[in-house]
Image: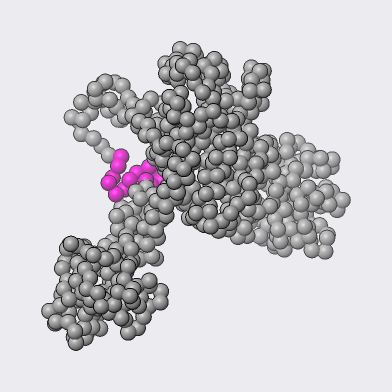
Amino acid sequence: MYRDVTCGALRTTDIGRNITLSGWVQKTRDKGFVVWIDLRDRYGITQLVMDEERSTLALLEQARQLGRETVLQVKGTVVERTSKNPNLPTGDIEVLVEGLTVLNPSLLPPFTIEDETDGGDDLRMKYRYLDIRRNPVKNNLIFRHRVSMEVRKYLSEQDFIEVETPYLIKSTPEGARDFLVPSRMNQGQFYALPQSPQTFKQLLMVGGMDKYFQIVKCFRDEDLRADRQPEFTQIDCEMAFVEQEDILNTFEGLTRHLLKEIHNIDVDAFPRMTYDDAMAKYGNDKPDIRFGMEFGELNEVAQHKEFNVFNSAELVVGIAIPGAATFTRKEIDKLIDWVKRPQVGAKGMVYVKYNEDGSFKSSVDKFYDAQDFEQWAQRTQAQPGDLICVLSGTAKATRAQLSALRMEMAERLGLRKADEFAPLWVVDFPLLELDEETGNYHAMHHPFTSPKPEQMELLDSDPGAVKANAYDLVLNGNEIGGGSIRIHDKEIQATMFKHLGFTPEEAKAQFGFLMDAFQYGAPPHGGIAFGLDRLVAILGGQETIRDFIAFPKNNSGRDVMIDAPADIDSTQLDELGIALNLD
Ligand code: ASP
């Protein structure tokens, strides 16, 4: 037997026990007449002791030779420590070693295996298996497991069945490129890896599995933005015989269950906000509502003077930054530079200091008077002491810019508190989104999303105005889940494909199987999918999903540990009937 107890288990009640432990050498301390070893495993650290009085010289000598990360088996007796360590659960005891067996030596690790490591990101990723020995990474993986288990528990109790769907499939459009897998047996043909199990879960509804879920990998070949992974995990769910309300309630229940079990937090009924309201109030379809700074639209109270920048703008909109009226000219200039960075893209920024004494000082004093500023303050809900920041331009771009400023200021002011959770539903998303480059519409959620039935006739006359039965669950400024009520009628699905620019032949070739299935008694259905990686990160009080994935890819989509993607040899290519044409 390698061990009969773990390195995190022993307490004073175990004093006198003979035990066998296995683990890694965290460090050794050699005081000459006594040697201590910290032995580590997943469960904790136990201090081992050998001294001249109680141990043989050979054993002491053997202990002195042990390098960090040696895999060790130890037999010994649990004894009370003379100087206890209150910071360690095992800190009241130590193990007086009677025998040491080296199970495997270790090279010197390229970075220290400690909570605060000296290893940079790249090095840690290359030796991820060593990184995982560190508490922060290890604990994140354990935390992820806990969240997954709670998800499975909750959904199973609600009668959901976990069903696996295939990975080698045909394209399921979720707005990204597919990862493709060449088929050896069908040369020249390719499978696509699922961007989501969307069509399969709908087919499961046709199959009568009225409550489905799956914790499942999805694959999207996107240009990687910060903190995106080409493969990621969804909690994918679908229900039959439901309306939007049923789905919102069920998954509000799941989220509430997680917040309760993981953080012992009770949250009131989640607020609901329409997409249009979210855009108008926060400039963002995933608003962080832990803090105010809501948008105040100023067209009516800013376009009556000679200030042409505002007069020619589609939207003039501001926010009040709490307590920032004391900003110096230099600080404000810096803020203006910040909004003008290409990543934000504003042309400039108008500011109004709403001083503590009720007076105003602004960059547009030439054009506006105190009465105007009173109105601006009212609309942005500014208090004396606040700084009102105003942007203008096209509605879409200006909202995005002001939203970026709002988030940035909240971050700087410490208003985005990791231990505060403010979920909400954003509902009534537009069905279609205009691609400004091509002039074509594409599905805002995905092509299987149902328009609001009462707006069906608008599809031909004003497609951009049609709202969908689509919803997102937003937590602390992150979209953690999104879904919709689906189309379950073949004709409506065909109409939808037409609006998305598919010819009937293309639609049949790509999605004939789904439309066929709709002719065999497809029940009304809908669902949602949560991004598990992000959900876990946010519940863990962090925003970087990579820290919660055992073996993540880097920002160029590479796994630097196994070195993938990689070249393949020519025999493999021949077998696949693929000729590379790389210039
Ligand atoms: N398949 C969708 C997605 O991946 C989620 C859903 O509509 O249920 O975003």
Q: Quadrant of residue 473?
A: top right
Is residue 465 covered in magenta? no
Nearest to the observer: residue 13 or residue 94: 13
Above or below, 374 against 75 in this view is: above
Please give the range of residues in magenta. 553-565
Q: Is residue 562 a member of the stretch shown in magenta?
A: yes
- Image spot of residue 296 (x, y percent): 74, 46
197 with respect to 462 (left or right)? left
Measured as percent of width and height from the top left, residue 575 is found at 20, 26
Q: Main secondary structure of the magenta part?
A: loop
Is residue 55 at all visible to an observer of this figure?
yes
Dividing the image into 4 quarters, which one contains the N terminus?
A: bottom left
* Rendering coords of residue 7 (x, y %): 29, 67
Q: Looking at the figure, which quarter contains the C terminus?
A: top left
Residue 515 seen in the current view: no
Vertical arrangement, residue 437 with respect to residue 318, above or below: above
Residue at (32% x, 84% y) in the render? 82
Mark count? 0
- Is 351 left, or right, of 224 in this rendering? right
Image-quadrant location for residue 427: top right
| Rendered residue at 66%/40% (across/down) | 273
Q: Is residue 178 left or right of residue 448?
A: left
**Residue at 33% from the left image edge and 76% from the top image edge:** 12
Residue drawn at x 31%, y 71% is 10
Q: Nearer the viewer, residue 81 or 134?
A: 81
Residue furthest top as drawn: 505
The front one of 533 and 410 is 533
Compared to 250, does 548 lie above or below?
A: below
